[in-house]
Image (cartoon, coloured by chain):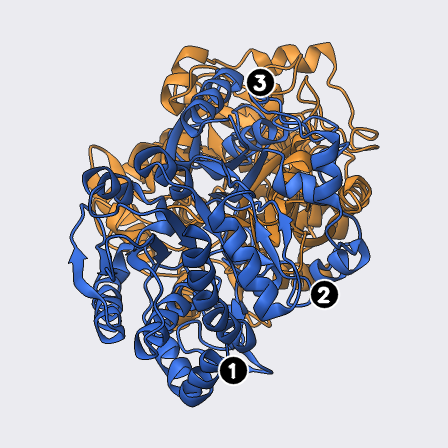
Chain colours: A orange, B blue
Amino acid sequence: MELIKQYIENNKQRLLDELFELLRFPSVSADPKYKADILKTADFVAKKLCDAGADNVEVCATAGYPIIYGEKIMDAGKPTVLIYGHYDVQPADPLELWNSPPFEPTIRDGKIYARGACDDKGQFYMHVKAFELMMQTNTLPCNIKFMIEGEEEVGSSNLAIFVKENKEKLKADMVLISDTSMISMEHPSLETGLRGLSYLEVEVTGPNRDLHSGVYGGAVANPATILAKMIASMHDENNHITIPGFYDKVVELTAAERTALNNAPYDEAEYKTDLGVDELWGEKGYTTFERTGTRPTLEVNGIWGGYTGEGAKTVLPSKAHAKISMRLVPNQTSDEITRLFTAHFEKIAPKAVKVKVTPHHGGEPAVTPTDSIAYRAAQKAIKTSFGKDPIPTRGGGSIPIVSLFEAELGIKTVLMGFGLDSDALHSPNEKYDIFNYYKGIETIPLFHKYFAELSV
Amino acid sequence: MELIKQYIENNKQRLLDELFELLRFPSVSADPKYKADILKTADFVAKKLCDAGADNVEVCATAGYPIIYGEKIMDAGKPTVLIYGHYDVQPADPLELWNSPPFEPTIRDGKIYARGACDDKGQFYMHVKAFELMMQTNTLPCNIKFMIEGEEEVGSSNLAIFVKENKEKLKADMVLISDTSMISMEHPSLETGLRGLSYLEVEVTGPNRDLHSGVYGGAVANPATILAKMIASMHDENNHITIPGFYDKVVELTAAERTALNNAPYDEAEYKTDLGVDELWGEKGYTTFERTGTRPTLEVNGIWGGYTGEGAKTVLPSKAHAKISMRLVPNQTSDEITRLFTAHFEKIAPKAVKVKVTPHHGGEPAVTPTDSIAYRAAQKAIKTSFGKDPIPTRGGGSIPIVSLFEAELGIKTVLMGFGLDSDALHSPNEKYDIFNYYKGIETIPLFHKYFAELSV
């Protein structure tokens, strides 16, 4: 522990400067115009892995952006940790809402403001530096493999292929990912699950053209009204989702799990004030943590139809649309829920309209066991560096690759994230606290240490 | 009659060219960006009235767009007809659905395709040309006054003020308007009633910012879902409107009125085929004619909220909006219905959201007598030019100024429209048959002739 702190202290400025170099690359995977920058970012990551002491470093070509691989095999007999991260970032717009340039990292009261500061450059780079630390101090207690991709923000489709084709190379005992959040530095936590996703777009067509709402109003089905009725019918008065079979595979949490989950600090008044709402709204019989972490949901992400411009247009629209996504919990599968939704939506559509359902993309839910050696190692590492046991939490978001690794490599993941919900991921003024960055570099070697010890 | 046909024959092309010139002005009153075009349209109309032989032509300034006035007083002793029309048009979007540019009139098998071709440029311009015809052939049998406004599609609020302030100038025995439809050229008809209108915009606000639908989904009210529920609740299972007090003043038609109304030719199969729907949809216990002509309705004219772009964005929107309009029948008043809607909408909003209701514009319903000299003159004119008695019908649309004229000027209106329901008013590919245009120019002088004769 002293050794770790000493190393960080001695290299404090350099560890920060290197992260800043990485953050200056505008590696926006969603926008082709950044292609050259993304390739430069990939080379930078590969070089830093080499410098840190990794062997067999490769910039692995894919149909999209390259995946950086690197490894250090100490001894085939020792356990192996696979580190996953991504060097691509979300688009930075709306640019006008940034207080400092998104690709010129700027420090304001102890926080690094830059696109990717937390998601995920700041977090995966902690692992590169922690690896360097262990190499430099001869304390790497296990084998380590890195897989850093460049398409996480656009669906990781080439990663799935890469993993399928490189099972041997990626062979490991567990996956370690820092791409999630803690409750706070005072309340360190570990995410023990993520929700899956089923995202669809629906179209309701009434008459074959927009009609004059006076001439035809009252005699022809209005697709906007019908869509509203269909959406309204998908939650009952207790906000349970009404799609037949939707909950069939959902496992209720045990009393113990619920207690553990709800032990996490939560101030409802503060939560409501932050969101500017007078009342919360959700499935009857569940707390906010349960609603966002352990229950499946159905949300309208977008809705549109008819005249949406200035002023008034007395039109009875021909079509109405909505983007609807469902967050899934363990045992629900994206394909099945997409099928159930589609069948239900088509079934409840009145004959006076035609409906079309188009699936966008999906991802599977995942829970990480809290009794595994890997989880216990993470727990112990955080306890040592933060002086407190981490609180197990359930993340409401989705990281589809977690279930991919389980399916293809047969290994579980530990989500040891050091971000905060307030880091504004995907939003303007994304930030990452310098404190969290160093804290991560300090905690990661402890994780490897305990994982190696507990694995014996 | 011969004289009329001859004049039209001799000027056929010019009569069409002038209408095309008028149709090329994008005089969209709902969108401020067309202001300059609308003012040009006003000047064009004024010039054409002068050319046709009108005296005292004025472009009368208002708080909004100008009203064009012009007159020809033959003899104070003769009856006076006030012609009303409007030179503004509905927005043209969605542009991509037009087969030819909305403001470049194009003829396809005998039909003029352009925004405003029928509503109302093509129809009011028939009166300007019929007036020219009567002047050129010295057959104007009565006094005539023109009042052509530029804000009909946005509620005619400044017309109301103009009429109140110019009662003497507008003094007349009746108002003649061509801004409605006939059943068909084989079944000429005259509308004897119009519905009123109450048009509002609603905004539902949930959280104070767009949220990540994974992190917050399930715990916070989604304004799009809430708006859908509120809209859905406004019609019951029989498609009756659920706003308390909404039907209180509605007078049921007598059995005789219903029979007369339903005697008009109507082919449901054809009606459905034209609209491309498998089933009709409306208030239980009423026929299509009754639903569109004699019953009040509530329609969603537009709805929007959240992410409506390409692909998928997992956002829980901060706001959702809708434009909602209600068509009113005799004894309902726009102000009262607007009040009832607003009170109800605010009452049914859950505490988890905030709602805002903004009235756009309204208009009162009107019924025109079928026993007046003016109506009989119109009947006779149509009988002469079409060879058939017109069928009395109830229009579903609204021309708020009809009740305004009755209240302020104490005179009744005759709705002698030459459009067709299939003219796609307010829709892409609005059209007006060349045949109807000429037929109107032929019928209007006959109306003036008979009105003068019957008035003696």
Which mark, residue B107?
1
Classed neighbour count for the residue bearing mark 3: other residues with Cα under 10 Å, few (<14), some (14–19), many (≥20): few
A348 vs B267, nearest the viewer: B267
Label 3 is found on which chain of the structure? Answer: B
Which mark, residue B298?
none
Q: Quadrant of residue B133?
A: bottom left
Do pointers 1 and 2 mark residues of a single chain?
Answer: no
Looking at the rendering, in which quadrant would you find the N terminus of chain A?
Answer: top left
Residue under numbered circle 2: A165
Label 2 is found on which chain of the structure? Answer: A
- Separation of marks 3 and 2 at Cα, in angstroms: 72 Å
- Separation of marks 1 and 2 at Cα, in angstroms: 61 Å
Identity of the residue drawn at 83% across and 32% down:
A244
Q: Position of residue B242 (x, y in %)?
A: 62, 22
**Mark closer to the observer (1, 2):** 1
Which mark, residue B248?
3
A262 vs B308, nearest the viewer: B308
Q: What element does badge 1 sit on?
A: strand
* Disc 1 residue type (three-letter): Ile
Q: Quadrant of residue A176?
A: top right
Q: Is residue A244 above or below residue A155?
A: above
* Disc 3 residue type (three-letter): Asp
